[in-house]
């Protein structure tokens, strides 16, 4: 079945640094990928839609300059948290769907736990 | 995007059948209904998807009435490992597949 891989699975860094998270579709192509954030005991919150070869579409309230998204190929999207602060600590999850198959559900990565000290 | 409403939590015992109902009164003609399972510190895992009537796979069944304003996920003979949060989502693929998560149902299976 469709597999979505995220890297790294866990990262700890100092406040003020930038962190890049990768999302890869391993056995299918995805023109669109999605980035979510999840705080403890809460549901997933959609942050942005990543579009291959064009700018990402951000949800209301999500700072585009803070969360940089690049979707340079049909199998890779990256999320960079710039100048990270403790309040950015969260669980970040990406998803993608196989564009070649109609009515395919989204498949999710296993998430990246980001801890900012 | 259709809003979904599910029970916040449910309790069950091993070996029982569990039915989780989701309301989506504003579902659109092109929307599909998809259910996901999430364990702590993991991404959601696809369980089942349907458009109307009944869908069954190796892990669950999905019942959708004719008006499609609700759906019921049925888990046969649950085990302790089925303890997780279950999300019901509706969305159309011609809208890029964008999904908005509701609060989900926290299922606790006891021995």
Image: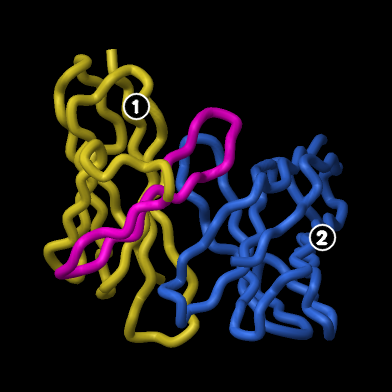
Q: Give the colour of chain A.
A: yellow
Q: Chain of mark 2?
A: B
Find disc 1 in the rendering and name its residue: A88
Where is B64 relative to A8, above or below?
below
Kind of element beneath mark 1: helix
- The answer to whether B17 appears left or right of B82 in the picture is right
Where is B44 relative to A96, above or below?
above
Q: Position of residue A26 (x, y in %)?
A: 25, 65
Q: Is residue A38 magenta?
A: yes
Where is A18 relative to A97, above or below?
above
Residue at 70 percent across and 77 percent down: it is B56
Colour convention = by chain
Q: Chain of mark 1?
A: A
Q: Position of residue B60 (x, y in %)?
A: 71, 67
Q: Which chain is blue?
A: B
CB-based contact (under 8 Å), mark 1 and mark 2: no
Image disc number at residue B84 = none
Q: Quadrant of residue A16?
A: top left
Find disc 2 in the rendering and name its residue: B21
Q: Nearer the viewer, mark 1 or mark 2?
A: 1
Q: Which residues are magenta?
A: A37-59
């Amino acid at each position: 079945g469709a597999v979505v891989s995220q890297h790294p699975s866990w990262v700890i860094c100092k406040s003020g640094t930038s962190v890049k998270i990768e999302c890869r579709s391993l056995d299918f192509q995805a023109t669109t990928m999605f980035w979510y954030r999840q705080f403890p005991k809460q549901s997933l919150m959609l942050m942005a839609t990543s579009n291959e070869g064009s700018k990402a579409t951000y949800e209301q309230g999500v700072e585009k300059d803070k969360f940089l998204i690049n979707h340079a190929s049909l199998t890779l999207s990256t999320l960079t948290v710039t100048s990270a602060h403790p309040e950015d600590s969260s669980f970040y999850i990406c998803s993608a769907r196989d564009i070649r198959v109609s009515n395919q559900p989204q498949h999710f990565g296993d998430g990246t736990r980001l801890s900012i000290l | 995007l259709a809003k979904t409403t599910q029970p916040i939590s449910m309790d069950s015992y091993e070996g029982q059948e569990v039915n989780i109902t989701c309301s989506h009164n504003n579902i659109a003609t092109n929307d599909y209904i998809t259910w996901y399972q999430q364990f702590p510190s993991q991404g959601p895992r696809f369980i089942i998807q349907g458009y109307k009537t009944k869908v069954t796979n190796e892990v669950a069944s999905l019942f959708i009435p004719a008006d499609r304003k609700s759906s019921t996920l049925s888990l046969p003979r649950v085990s302790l490992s089925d303890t997780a949060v279950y999300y019901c989502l509706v969305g159309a693929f011609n809208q890029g597949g964008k999904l908005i998560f509701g609060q989900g149902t926290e299922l606790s299976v006891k021995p």
